[in-house]
Structure formats: structure tokens, C-alpha cells
Amino acid sequence: MRLDTGRDRLLWIGLAAAFAALFVRQLALAVFLAFLVASPLRLGFGRRWLLYAMSPTLLACISLAAYSRVLAHFGRLPGMYYLKANSLNNSIQDLLHFRLGALKPALRAALMMFMLAGLFALPLLSALCPSLVSGFEKGGRNLRLGWIVGFTCVVTAALAAIGNLLPMSGNIIEDFRMGIISPPGSGLPVAPKAYWIVLTTGAAVGLSLLVLVLFNLSTAAIRERDERGARLRFRVIFLVLTGVLYTPQGTE
């Protein structure tokens, strides 16, 4: 990314990928909004911020609005196109009226997304595991290993006890495949419960490692006041904001 290396090309490639994702699912707008808020830590509020953050965000918003109008004009707009936006608006209205039950879908969505993030990031996070626990005194290493084991056991046992093992969403991962739920009688194999227990355990391990990564980034960002600290603060704020913006809309 340009914010670390000074190379514009890498930043434009990342923005182009986010822009393409916008037309797959509107939730990709969260990436632009989070980048818009976090980027002043590296770019300030001058011309670079307008060029690399404000302009792409405005372009994304305008393009998404124009895309929906084009689809509507040609009669191609899906019936559920505005479902997420309407759901988010209803949730905000409920919270403004102190109906805290509106938080339940968002919390469930957060749990689902955190578990899936831990599952799919597990291969990379496993490679990072030695660096996450090494470099500390014996007590520090034991504390981190205890966190990984304890977190995994507690989360897996709790989800198994309430019958909420993976797959949680019901429309992303189903039996041995990914995609929309098939109609009854499709003849697809059904995964045994042991399969989902193993998968949930792996997701919990990945999530525990992900928490350690964020903890390391956060502590270093607070402790360091030099150029590296500024880069770390940008990363932490960008990641947290992306998750916060995505979570309320990430329900089924």
C-alpha cells in the first residue's frame, strides 16, 4: 500500500479491487468509508487526502447510486436490492427509540462474521502463530498460549451447548458446499455434527489468533510515537471501522 511504501500503484490496485467488489455487494462501500476516516493519520487533510480518499469514496457512492438507477430503468433491479439498507435504517430507528432488541441481529451477525473470518484466515494466522507467542518471557508465552487454548475451548463448547455451531448463516455455507441453500430433495450429502465441531474449533482458533494480532497492533500503535506508530494506528482504525460499518448490515 502507498501509505507504507510510497507506491501509488499498490494503493490504486487496492481501490480498484474494492470498487469492483462494490458491484458484487454494496457492503464493499464500508471499505471506502473506513479508508476515508482513517487515511488522515497518514495523508493529513490536504490534496493527497482529497485525491486518494475523498475522491474515490465520492466516486464509489455516485457509481453505486447510478448503477441502481440503471438497473431499475431496465427492469433488472432485484427485489431484495435495498433489503440491507432498509434493514440498517430500521435498526437505527429502533435504537434511537431505545428498543435494544434491535441489537440482537447485529450481534448475531458479528459473531457469525468473526467466526468465518477466523476460519478463512486460519492458514495465514497459523503461519503467524510463532511470531505471536515468541519474543516474550516464559510467562508471556504461557499467557498467550493459554489464551489461544482457553478461548478456543470456551467458544467451541458454548456454541455446541446452544446448538449454534458452524454454519451459522444458513445461506453461505451449507453442508459440504458454499452457496444458497438447495431445495429439499436435492440429494446433497449432509455433514455429520463432528465435521462442524472440527470446523467450529478451527474457526475459534483462528479468531483467537486474530484477536492477538489486533491486540499487538493496538498496543504497538499506542506505545510508538514515530512513523511506524502512525502506520499502525492507521491500520488499527481502518480494520476496526471496516468491521463496525459492515457488521450491522451483515445479517442474513
Image (spheres, rainbow, N blue to C red):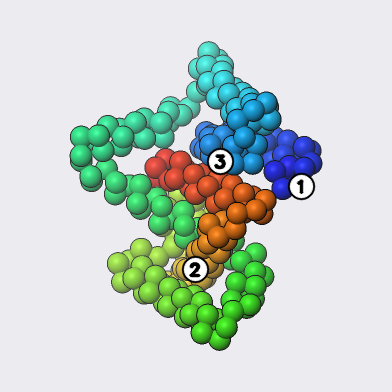
Residue 56 percent location from the top left of the image: 63, 28
Report the residue at 39% width, 42% height from top: 248
* Few, some or many residues within 10 Å of mark 3 (<14, 14–19, 20+): many
Q: What residue type is disc 2 on?
A: Ser
Kindly identify which numbered label has been placed on residue 5.
1
Q: Are discs 1 and 3 less than 8 Å apart at CB?
A: no
* Few, some or many residues within 10 Å of mark 1 (<14, 14–19, 20+): few
Corner quadrant of residue 153: bottom left
Kindly identify which numbered label has been placed on residue 38.
3
**Is residue 51 placed above or below 4 in the rendered structure?**
above
Residue 159 percent location from the top left of the image: 36, 67
N-terminal label among 2 and 3: 3
Circle 2 residue = 208
Kindly identify which numbered label has been placed on residue 16.
none
Label 1 residue SS = helix
- Depth-wise, is mark 1 or mark 2 nearer the camera? 1
Alpha carbons under labels 2 and 3: distance apart:
25 Å
Q: What residue type is disc 3 on?
A: Ala
Q: What residue type is disc 1 on?
A: Thr
**Is residue 178 placed above or below 189 in the rendered structure?**
above
Q: Quadrant of the N terminus?
A: top right
**Is residue 141 placed above or below 188 in the rendered structure?**
below
User: Between residues 17 and 42, which one lies in front from this camera angle?
Assistant: 42
Report the residue at 44% width, 45% height from top: 244
Alpha carbons under labels 1 and 2: distance apart:
29 Å
